[in-house]
Amino acid sequence: MIGTIVNSISIVLGCIIGIIVKGRLSEKISTTVMNGLALCVIYIGIEGAFKGENTLLTIVCIALGALLGEIIDIDKWLNKLGNYLEVKFNKDKEKEAVSISEGFVSASLLFCVGAMAIVGSLQSGLSVNHETLFAKSILDGVSAIIFTSTLGIGVLFSAVSVFLYQGIITILSSSLSGILSTPVINSMTAIGSLLIIGLGLNMLKVTNIKVANLLIAVFLPILAGMTNII
C-alpha cells in the first residue's frame, strides 16, 4: 500500500499548490491550460490503448461493461457523491466557476482509470514493486496542480477515490496472481486507456460520454482469464 499512500499524498499536495495558484490565473488562461491537459489525456489514452492484444475481447468487454454500468448507473451514484460534497463544502456556489462535483468526478476518473493506476497497483500487490505508482505520483501531483487551478477544490477529494481504488486492486491482486497473466493485464490496460480517451474528449466538451458507467469493463478481462478465454 506504500505506493498508493504516496500517490494519494501527492494529489493532496498538488491540490494545495493548485488552490494557491488558482486566484492568479485568468479564466482565459485556465481554459487554455485545461484544453491542453485534455489533449495530453487523449494522448496518454491512445498510447495505452495499443497495448491490447485481443481486439475482439476489448469490444466485448466494453459492450458488456457498458450494459452492466448503465444498469447499475455508476455515473449517477458518483455524481450524487459529488453533489453531496458540493452541499457540504461549497457554501457559495457563485464564487466557483466549476462545481465541486465536476472537479471531483473528472479528477477521480482521470487518476483511477489510467493504465498506470491498474498496472502499478498490480505490481505493488504481486511483487511489492512501487516504482510505477511512484512515477504516477509525480504525474498526478503535477496534474492535480493544474486541475485544481481550473476545476477547483473538488479535485482534492479525488485523493480518497485513488486511495480506495488502487488500494483495493493492490490487496486483491495477491489472491488473483494465478489469473493475472500478461494478456489479461494488457487487456485491462487497453480498456482503461480507451476510457481515458473518452474522458479527454469530455474535457474538451466534444462528447458527453458517461465514462464512469464503463468502469466495469476494465475488470472483465479477469473473468476471461479465469475461463481461459485469453
Image (cartoon, grey):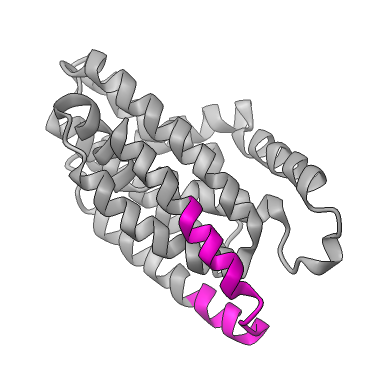
- What residue is shown at x 39% (from left), y 56% (from top)? 140
Compared to 46, does 2 lie above or below? above
* Percent coordinates x, y for residue 146 in the rendering: 50, 69
The residue range painted magenta reads 12-35
Q: Does the magenta-highlighted stretch encompass residue 19?
A: yes
Lateral position of residue 219 relative to residue 32, left or right:
left
- What residue is shown at x 41% (from left), y 52% (from top)? 10
Compared to 37, does 27 lie above or below? below
Q: Main secondary structure of the magenta part?
A: helix
Compared to 120, does 50 lie above or below? below
- What residue is shown at x 55% (from left), y 31% (from top)? 69
Instruction: Answer with the quarter of the image where residue 223 lies.
Output: top left
Residue 86 can be seen in this image? yes
Lateral position of residue 132 relative to residue 161, left or right:
left
Q: Does the magenta-highlighted stretch encompass residue 174?
A: no
- What residue is shown at x 59% (from left), y 78% (from top)? 30
Look at the image and tell me in which quarter the C terminus lies. top left
Residue 209 can be seen in this image? no
